[in-house]
Image: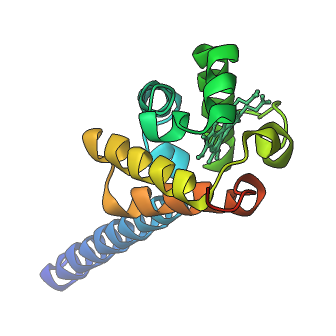
Amino acid sequence: MFTRKMSLWAVLGFITILLAGFHTAVAQSGAEQKQQSLYDRLGGLAPISVVVSDFIEVLVPDAVLNANPAIDAARKRVPAPYLKYHVTAMVCQATGGPCQYHGRGMKESHAHLNITEREWDRMVTLFKEVLAKHKVPAKETQELLDIVGSTKADIVVAQQR
Ligand code: HEM
């Protein structure tokens, strides 16, 4: 016999199951958020390629950087689309995306440019401006700056001029 007492238990049981399912779903979505790579949080390859392209567009003609004759000579010789391709692949890989960087190492590709601390700082300023223009959030901006910063020791080789 399905008594009133039994149906109350059935309702309570059903609510318990619902709540347990809800908690599991919330816990899972929290874990997924935690696991999301920087690459995913930036929106993947398309937005990354746009940000890199804009960055190279402001870097290549910059007067502060081109006051260094080695940088000026290299930017005239090396096509901007080549730099955009390699830097996009590098950022994609470094942020946890599916790309593989096949370019040269940072030491090898920058040694002849005699890059100083001041030129490095200028590059960081330009990079931050591009990230701000694209409304990259503070957390993701900091993570990108950390990735770029990790290459500094290989890139800055010259004393101030
Ligand atoms: C002040 C800072 C920087 C300046 C002025 C600069 C400028 C340049 C120039 C002129 C080249 C072409 C060199 C050549 O082939 O003769 C180059 C190559 C490259 N740079 Fe930079 N760069 C800077 C920092 C960075 C940083 C921070 C990254 C990445 C985290 C980066 C990634 C690359 C890559 C991937 C290449 C191509 C490597 C290859 O040819 O295989 N650069 N850079």
Picture coordinates of residue 161, whole percent (x, y): 61, 56
Name, please, the residue furthest toward the bottom.
5
Name, please, the residue furthest toward the front.
161
In the displayed structure, 61 sits above or below 118; it is above
Picture coordinates of residue 139, whole percent (x, y): 39, 64
Q: In the rendered image, is residue 26 in sight? A: yes
Q: Residue at x 37, y 74 (%)?
A: 20
Image quarter of residue 58: top left
Q: Residue at x 64, y 33 (%)?
A: 69
Picture coordinates of residue 119, whole percent (x, y): 54, 51
Q: Residue at x 81, y 31 (%)?
A: 103
Q: Nearer the viewer, residue 63 or 5?
A: 63
In the displayed structure, 71 sits above or below 142; it is above
Q: How many marks?
A: 0
Picture coordinates of residue 133, whole percent (x, y): 26, 40
* Image quadrant containing the N terminus: bottom left
The type of colouring in the image is rainbow
Give ligand 1's quarter of the image: top right
Q: Nearer the viewer, residue 159 or 56?
A: 159
Q: In the rendered image, is residue 36 in sight? A: no
Image quarter of residue 134: top left
| In the displayed structure image, the side of residue 94 where residue 46 appears, left or right | left
Q: Nearer the viewer, residue 69 or 119?
A: 69
Q: Residue at x 81, y 45 (%)?
A: 111
Q: Nearer the viewer, residue 155 or 27?
A: 155
Name, please, the residue furthest toward the left.
4
In the displayed structure, 21 sits above or below 55; it is below
